[in-house]
Image: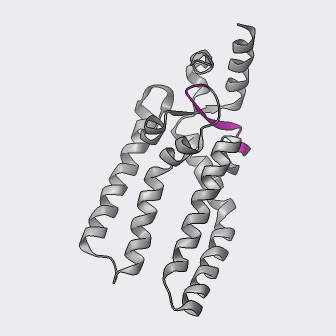
Amino acid sequence: MDNSKVDQLLEDDFVGFWPRLLIALIDGVILIGPIYLLNRWATFLMNTWHSEIPIIIPWLVYIVYYVYLVSRFGGTPGRLLLRTRIINAKGNYPTIIQALLRYGFYIINSLFVVISTFTSHGTDQITALNFLMTCVFIIDGLFIIFMVRNQALHDKMAGTYVVYKSGLEYAEAVHERS
C-alpha cells in the first residue's frame, strides 16, 4: 500500500493544536485515578522492599499502555472519544516501533524524572536536562501550529499523523474505489 490514503486527506482532516490539547486533558482526567493508585502501590513496594526499583513500575506500565493503545486502536481514550486517530504514512495505525518513537520524548523526560527521584533533589545535570526537555516539548507544540498537516516533531520522527476519523474513513473509501 502506498501513501494514497494520507494523500486523499484534506487539510482540515489533520488535527490541530487545540483539539490535541483537549485530548491530552481528557486523557489526564481519565488516567489520574489509576496513575495515583499505581504510584501509591509502587511507593508501598519501595517502603516494603527497601528498594527504589518499584518506582519504575508505573513508568513501564504507562509506556506499555500508551504503545499498545496507539498501535492497536490508533489512540488513547481521549483521542478515541474525540474521534481522532494516529496513523502512519500508509494510513494504518502505527507499528509498535512507530508508537515508541512517537512517545520517545515522554519516555526520555520521564526517565529523567525517575533518575532525579534516586538522586538527592536532582543534580544540576538532571535539572538542565529537564529544562532542555521542556524546551523540546514547547518546540514540539509549535510544530503542530506551523507545520504542514499539523505534524508535531514527534510525529515527524515516527512518520505519523493525527487525523479525524471521518476524514480517514473518507480517504479509505476513495482508496478502495481506485
Nearer to us in this view, 143 or 71: 71
Q: Is residue 1 left or right of residue 122?
A: right
Identify which residue is drawn at 73% across, 45% down: 81
Q: Is residue 116 magenta?
A: no
Q: Quadrant of the C terminus?
A: top right
Residue 65 drawn at (x, y percent)? 64, 57
Q: Is residue 82 magenta?
A: yes
Residue 138 drawn at (x, y percent)? 38, 48
Farthest residue toward the left? 124
Q: Is residue 5 left or right of residue 106?
A: right
Q: Quadrant of the N terminus?
A: top right
Identify which residue is drawn at 43% across, 43% down: 141
Magenta residues, start to end: 80-90
Identify which residue is drawn at 58% across, 70% down: 58
Residue 70 drawn at (x, y percent)? 63, 45
Instruction: Note whether 34 is above or below 25 in the view shown.
Output: below
Residue 177 drawn at (x, y percent)? 75, 9
